[in-house]
Image (cartoon, rainbow, N blue to C red):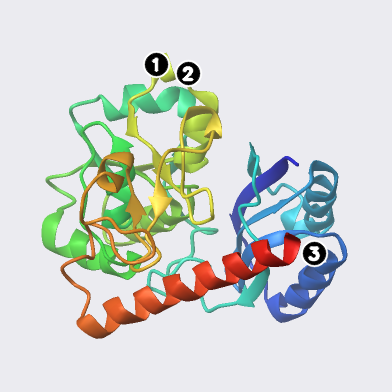
Amino acid sequence: MSYAVATFYKFVALPDCETLRSQIFEHCQQNNVYGSILLAQEGINGTVCSDREHLTAFIEFLRQDPRLCDLTTKESESDRAPFDRLKVKVKPEIVTLGKPDINPSERAGTYVKPQDWNALIQDPEVLVIDTRKAFEVSTGTFAGAVDPNLDSFREFPGYVETNLNPTQHPKVAMFCTGGIRCEKASAYMLSVGFETVYHLEGGILKYLEEIDPEESLWEGECFVFDQRVSVTHGLHPGSHTICVACGYPVSPEEMRSPLYQPGLSCPSCHDLLTATQQQRNRERVRQRQQIKANKLSSLS
């Protein structure tokens, strides 16, 4: 079976997000739509999967709300289910910056379409910033982009305050996975005095979907928060897997490392796990192997 995957977000006032949560949850349950959807008074953010028919029906269901009638999606296909459960939650923010006064629906940076992105980031006067977490950046990024080395998006304002200056960096271009973080980051930067701020429309996913590999300035793969782990140009599944011990992506090269033990550790966490954590991981692997053996035995 082929699964259709849709990623979407929109900053728009949703004061009734609690009621909307119930409606969305009920629709998804009835139509076999799985994934993760966040709602807040500032908007909606989600990634979901289903068969093509039900996914299309779900997006149309969302667009029946006049506030979401122009909701755009980034869609791809997967030969395995990226999600096996449904989560629809109400949060204070749909992407947590920790600056509740920032409202991208009122003021944000300038959208740049994927077709115009290469020319912009090759301009020597433009500072290009990757607004994602450090482990995401390690999977892939744009050539020449600055990595703020973030453990959390909440750290972005502090990075700007410490490292950037509106007078020294008059032009800034930012990007993230689907566009939501860099849109909110652009609103924040405008609020603290940066004059010209750009952000990649549709994020890395839209760029990889629309730009030919021969013309691309993207290096590596793009980490995604589902069971695909990473995607490449054309939004095809990438080559990374996930370390169940620490949740970080593991590249094919890292899988060949003696520090990589499936279910136990990877090069990123091997030296950080306590003896108790290592034993807990070993027990979890043993239990999974036993469950698998029991299933095989019942089928024989």
For the C terminus, the image quarter is bottom right
The kind of residue tagged 3 is Cys
Q: Is residue 154 left or right of residue 102?
A: left
Whether residue 38 appears in this view of the structure is: no
Label 2 neighbour load within 10 Å: few <14, some 14-19, many 20+: few
Residue at image position (52%, 79%) is: 92
Tell me if label 1 and label 2 are in contact, CB under 8 Å.
Answer: yes
Position of residue 159 measured from the top left corner of the image (x, y, whole percent): 19, 62
Q: What's the mark number on residue 46?
A: none
Q: Nearer the viewer, residue 268 or 72?
A: 268
Q: Is residue 177 left or right of residue 153?
A: right
Q: Nearer the viewer, residue 244 or 223?
A: 244
Residue at image position (27%, 65%) is: 151
Label 1 neighbour load within 10 Å: few <14, some 14-19, many 20+: few
Depicted 137 relative to depicted 104: above or below = above
Residue at image position (23%, 39%) is: 145
Q: Which residue is mark 2?
A: 212
Instruction: State the residue lying farthest toward the front.
Output: 300
Badge 3 marks a residue whose secondary structure is helix
Instruction: State the residue lying farthest toward the bottom.
Output: 276
Residue at image position (38%, 37%) is: 221
Q: Which residue is mark 1?
A: 215
The kind of residue tagged 2 is Asp
Depicted 226 relative to depicted 293: above or below = above
Tell me if label 3 and label 2 are in contact, CB under 8 Å.
Answer: no
Instruction: State the residue lying farthest toward the top.
Output: 214
Label 3 neighbour load within 10 Å: few <14, some 14-19, many 20+: many
Q: Which residue is mark 3?
A: 28
Position of residue 294 measured from the top left corner of the image (x, y, whole percent): 63, 70
**How far apart are the alpha carbons under marks 1 and 2?**
5 Å
